[in-house]
Amino acid sequence: MNQKSKNGTFTSKVGFVLAAVGSAVGMGNIWMFPYRTGQYGGAAFLIPYLLFVALFGYVGLSGEFAFGRLTGTGPIGSYEYAMQTRGKKGGAFLGAIPLFGSLGIAIGYSIIVGWVVRSAFGALTGSLMTTEPEAFFAEMSATHLSSVPWHVIVVLITIAILIFGVSGGIEKINKVMMPAFFILFLIIAVRVAFLPGAIQGYKYLLVPQWEYLLNPKTWIYAMGQAFFSLSVTGSGMIIYGSYLSKKEDVVHSSCMTAVLDTCAAMLAGFAILPAVFSFGLDPAAGPSLLFITLPRVFQQMPAGRLFALLFFISVLFAGITSLANMLEAVSEAAQTRLKMNRKPAVLLAGAATLAVGLFIEKEPLMGRWMDIITLYVVPIGAILGAVMIYWVLGTKRIKTELMEGRDKPLSPLFDPLAKYVYVFLAAIVVICSFVIPGGIG
């Protein structure tokens, strides 16, 4: 196939990697990774987690990037192409499943990022610092249409980024937002290190409890955290791969993405948990950590208003860069399947996201929506992607693409790791998503 995307390409390796990191770094890195690390053995949890990150980065991310670069299109066209190599039909239908997963996440994600914008504005004006966090969160999430302006702002920002294209929009904004994300979180991490009792947060994260390595749940949750943190979902990374130059080393870019994503998760842990422990709050608060627990921390912290603003701006950057990837996959499908120009396609993707999201702004509804998408649709899309790349298209063809722009040969273990270990683990992720309450990602 090897067609050049009509949306252009990333102009540099740095731009591509930062865009991929922007897609991968999201709410799961910020609120889930820190408490799950402490919950399942501290530094001991990092051993299986890093093993899975290495595997999924080397085989999963690189496979999706190469698949997209090979076909020059998103999941629908890529899956269709893979099936056609076997003389089969139905690839477009299968590719629509992970694409719907991207749209589904974008619908709920835009609401959550709207809450982040509202919280940042509250920090700026001071209202976040003078209101009970539960009441502040309820004001923006407890009723229908309670967060419309902030929700709309998020979607409009994302549309504005995407309208400028791959190099002029996605690449440029990630070159600004992702370094800013790391810098802002580093500033917060340094500040909270001086809070009394912060050492307990570091112990929670870093003191190994080796007995947890004998607990199967530690390995299962480490696998789920790594899998979803890297966004190997059979959709978003394929579309970014379709914009990658043939001169770039896909495997190296994949490994760099995995390393930076892990750094982001660790940095979030160092910024959040010491502060939470310093004020005697619950580190396993889940999503409410962002909107209830941490605002309570900022209310008690010297210069808390400033650090609350910096925190929510950095979370906003992570949310917007992830949302841009999701809507890019949807808008590219509208261009290729509905024969639309880029701007109308981007507007359609944004309008669809907002139109559905307006009906589920109430937090319980949004939570149920996200559960359905993340527990069922996304894992199924991920296993479809893995099978499509390594069994339908085949390791021989994808390895040829992986060697484009690369001098060093792939490991002899690549084939068995890809076809058997990675695909098997992707299937386990699907099974666990169905049978374990709340899933594993």
Image: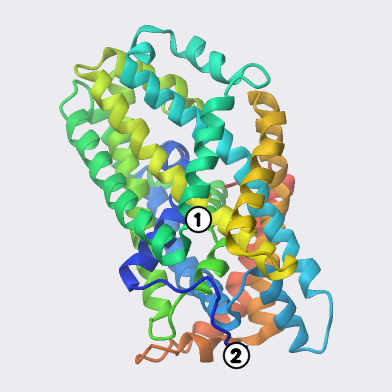
Q: Kindly indicate the quadrant of the structure image that contains residue 12.
A: bottom left
Instruction: Tell me the amino acid under the disc marked 2.
Output: Arg
**Which residue shows up at 51% across the image and 28% down it?**
150
Of 35 and 292, the residue lying toward us: 292
Q: Which residue is mark 2?
A: 397
Instruction: Tell me the amino acid under the disc marked 1.
Output: Leu
Q: Is residue 126 left or right of residue 436?
A: left
The crowd level at tag 1 (other Cα within 10 Å; few <14, some 14-19, many 20+) is: many
Q: Is residue 78 left or right of residue 112?
A: right
Q: Which residue is mark 1?
A: 162
**Which residue shows up at 56% across the image and 14% down it?**
138
Q: How many marks?
A: 2
User: In the rendering, at what x and y percent does residue 133 appear?
Assistant: 44, 13
Regarding residue 222, the answer to whether it shows in the image is no
Regarding residue 350, the answer to whether it shows in the image is yes
User: In the rendering, at what x and y percent does residue 264 appear?
Assistant: 34, 49
The answer to whether residue 417 is above or below residue 22 is: below
**Which residue shows up at 77% across the image and 86% down it?**
84
Between the residue at mark 2 and the residue at mark 1, the CA separation in whole angstroms equals 31 Å
Label ID, residue 151: none
